[in-house]
Image (cartoon, rainbow, N blue to C red):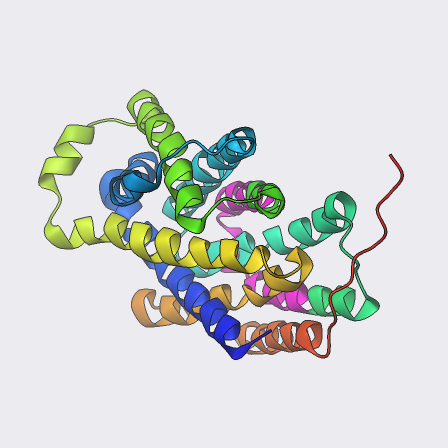
Amino acid sequence: MPLRDWALALLANTAWAFNFVAGKEGSAQFEPLMFTALRFSVVLLLLFPFLKIIPGQMSTIIKIGALLGVGHFSLIFLGINMAGGVGGVAIATQLYVPFATLMAWLWLGEFMTVQRWMGTFLAFAGVVLVGFDPEVLKYWQALLLVSIAGLFMAVATIWMKRLQGVGIWQLQAWIAAVATPCLWTLSLLFEHHQLQLLTSAHWWQWAAPVYSALGATLTGHAIVYYLVQRYPVSLTTPLLMISPIMAIFIGILLYGEEPGWKLWVGAAMTLSGIGVIHARLRGRRRPPRPS
């Protein structure tokens, strides 16, 4: 992988790490579903010129929009709102990595070397160790929601891999177009006092959905789409496991979280696993299965 793509992956990780903070603060002010709707409203406003029909691809695009825009993100911000901090939620989001790796092997026929399986296991085991804390387990409902969100993202990632001739901004525009009306409807059905919350928010509280749109969606997920179009899913997804480690350090600084030795050992395992995955790998594909 060229140095440029490594830098892009680091940028995506950083954008996602700070998005946990934006989600925590934004969902507290606006309610989780409304915060998610605001996020995608900003994306739709900015990318509306890219909203054009793409022949032969719309069915897959709409499924990605529903699964990623509505399912994944609503569950993520519901979980963030329920949790006491951001570290545990950041850990649970990484369950999409083994989900995506297994699905890429089964559905796309991506070849998995022993080295790649070991690296993925080591990286994921490190993330699990970091999150294996009694304080985190107090919010098991939040972890369950975020784990399901990880499964949704894994499926959406596989569908992204199958797209052809769809630009990054076109895909993001359509995800926002699918998600925005659905999320506003869900918010009106299950949340209350939307108008009061909108009118009482200060400018710095509005910064949360704006950052989530610009940082996480227009930067982070655009980079992921770029990477999965060029590299195997089983190679790119473990690289993105740095974001929960970064989120934990952010939680220490902003929320006074106090992780112990598990943080340091788990972080070392995760980064080592990523190194194993990317050491002298050559892209190969498993022969397709007979139909």
> Picture quarter containing residue 97?
bottom right
Residue at the image position 56 percent from the left and 47 percent from the top: 150
Left/right placement of residue 234 relative to residue 13 reads right
Secondary structure character of the magenta stretch overall: helix
**Image coordinates for residue 100, horizontal then vertical, percent:** 65, 50
Q: In the displayed image of the protein, which residue is found farthest to the right?
A: 290
Vertical comparison of 101 with 236: above or below: above
The reply to whether residue 259 is in sight is no
> Picture quarter containing residue 270?
bottom right
Position of the C terminus by quadrant: top right
Vertical comparison of 244 with 271: above or below: above
Residue at the image position 15 percent from the left and 29 percent from the top: 195
65 or 208: which is nearer to us? 65
Position of the N terminus by quadrant: bottom right
Residue at the image position 56 percent from the left and 74 percent from the top: 267
- Which residues fall within the magenta stretch? 123-151
61 or 144: which is nearer to us? 61
**Image coordinates for residue 49, horizontal then vertical, percent:** 29, 40
52 or 129: which is nearer to us? 52
**Image coordinates for residue 146, horizontal then vertical, percent:** 51, 45
Residue 230 among those drawn in magenta: no
The reply to whether residue 111 is in sight is yes
Residue 132 among those drawn in magenta: yes
Q: In the displayed image of the protein, which residue is found farthest to the top?
A: 189
**Image coordinates for residue 66, horizontal then vertical, percent:** 48, 32
Left/right placement of residue 86 relative to residue 24 reads right
Vertical comparison of 146 with 63: above or below: below
Left/right placement of residue 206 relative to residue 16 reads left
Residue at the image position 19 percent from the left and 28 percent from the top: 193
